[in-house]
Image (tube, helix red, strand yellow):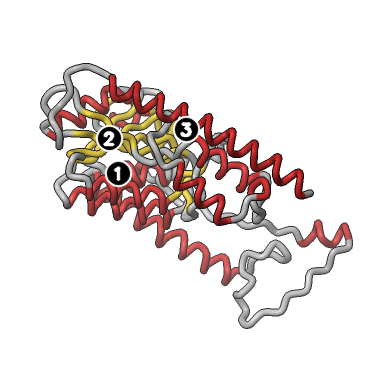
């Protein structure tokens, strides 16, 4: 067993050495890049909202977890706000939505960023729906591809009633609870009429908050938003016709628009937020999917922490 740990550590050290070489090479290439750039203090920060929006700290990895972490996005927005070289922020959104609370938290940070005088533009990729649109609606301008799937302004809450299935396979759940609604939504039994009403009130409350965000962000009459907020999705072109987006175009069109709105002269400097080093991405994915709750390849938490600090250098990508 000890020999196995030693071999694993050698593998990790070799991996780290390779990542350092690649990262330093990327830094050298980046530093040698030419072209007419805008002056210092006129950069655009790009923040990616990719995957299902959650309130957890877990982020995407090279294994493709497909998570847009609310806490991570808030941190990136704050970093952009505190960076004097960032004059504007472009939110590149590819998300079907997710947690309403996490979307709301990210949206509130966008409000703070705009109050600092920084322009915020949302660029929609494949999808920017539900919570993804909630975040986009907080931007100064929204640009989408004609074929982007967006909208889905609404709220959904689901539960499963598996009582009949449990009866068929001979499972009899036993529940001890402090109040009549403590197990509301449990798959062990159907909802009561009273519980269904309680959950509907919750959905309606969050829905009204969503409508308020869209009405304020898009400067639309609430009645008009309500006509569109029935949960349907729109193409980017349809969304523009309804006033849900401002312009049609791709990522580079959005960069151009962001620079113009921010008054940046010349080609803007682009700074991408949120990228971890390749080793951090690898380590995150392995720990989340392969060895939850265990040490990575026999390394102690202190050793893992030391490697993380060591690799906080120029991102590879």
> How far, Cα to Cα, is label 2 from label 1?
8 Å
Q: Is residue 125 above or below residue 116?
A: above
Q: Is residue 157 visible?
A: yes
N-terminal of the two: label 3 or label 1?
A: 3
Residue 218 in which image quadrant: top left
Image check: 154 left or right of 211? right
Residue 6 image position (x, y, % from top left): 70, 44
Image check: 69 left or right of 160? left
Answer few, some or many: residues within 10 Å of disc 2's Cα (few below 14, many 20 plus, some between 14 and 19): many
Which mark, residue 137?
1
Q: Is residue 221 visible?
A: no
Residue 116 image position (x, y, % from top left): 16, 51
What's the residue at 21%, 31% (across, down)? 258
What's the residue at 40%, 42% (across, down)? 132
What's the residue at 26%, 45% (across, down)? 80
N-terminal of the two: label 2 or label 1?
A: 1
> How far, Cα to Cα, is label 3 from label 1?
40 Å
Front residue of this view, candidates 60 and 310 = 310
Front label number (3 vs 1): 3
Residue 173 image position (x, y, % from top left): 79, 69
> Marks 2 and 1: CB-CB under 8 Å?
yes
Task: Tell me the element at label 1.
Answer: loop
Residue 259 in which image quadrant: top left
- Circle 2 is placed at which residue position? 142
- Circle 3 is placed at which residue position? 20
Front residue of this view, candidates 53 and 85 = 85
What's the residue at 25%, 39% (across, down)? 89
Task: Tell me the element at label 2.
Answer: strand
Answer few, some or many: residues within 10 Å of disc 3's Cα (few below 14, many 20 plus, some between 14 and 19): many
């Amino acid at each position: 067993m000890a020999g196995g740990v030693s071999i694993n550590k050698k593998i990790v050290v070799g991996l780290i050495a390779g990542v350092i070489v690649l990262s330093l090479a990327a830094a050298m290439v980046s530093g040698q890049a030419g072209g007419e750039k805008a002056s210092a203090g006129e950069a655009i920060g790009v923040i990616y909202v990719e995957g299902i929006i959650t309130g957890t700290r877990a982020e995407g990895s090279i294994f493709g977890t497909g998570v847009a972490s609310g806490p991570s996005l808030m941190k990136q927005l704050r970093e952009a706000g505190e960076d004097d070289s960032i004059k504007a922020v472009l939110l590149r959104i590819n998300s079907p939505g997710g947690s309403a609370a996490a979307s709301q938290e990210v949206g509130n940070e966008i409000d703070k960023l705009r109050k600092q005088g920084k322009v915020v533009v949302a660029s929609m990729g494949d999808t920017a729906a539900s919570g993804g649109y909630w975040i986009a609606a907080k931007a100064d301008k929204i640009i989408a591809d004609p074929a982007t799937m967006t909208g889905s302004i609404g709220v959904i809450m689901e539960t499963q009633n598996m009582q009949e299935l449990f009866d068929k396979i001979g499972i009899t759940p036993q529940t001890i609870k402090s109040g009549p609604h403590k197990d509301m939504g449990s798959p062990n039994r159907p909802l009561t009429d009273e519980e269904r009403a309680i959950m509907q009130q919750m959905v309606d409350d969050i829905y009204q908050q969503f409508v308020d965000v869209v009405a304020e962000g898009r400067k639309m009459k609430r009645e008009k938003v309500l006509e569109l907020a029935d949960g349907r999705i729109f193409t980017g072109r349809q969304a523009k016709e309804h006033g849900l987006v401002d312009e049609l175009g791709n990522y580079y069109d959005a960069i151009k628009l962001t620079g113009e709105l921010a008054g940046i002269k010349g080609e803007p400097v682009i700074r991408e937020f949120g990228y971890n080093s390749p080793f951090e991405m690898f380590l995150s994915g392995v720990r989340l999917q392969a060895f939850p709750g265990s040490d990575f390849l026999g390394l102690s938490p202190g050793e893992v922490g030391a490697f993380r600090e060591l690799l906080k250098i120029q991102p590879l990508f």
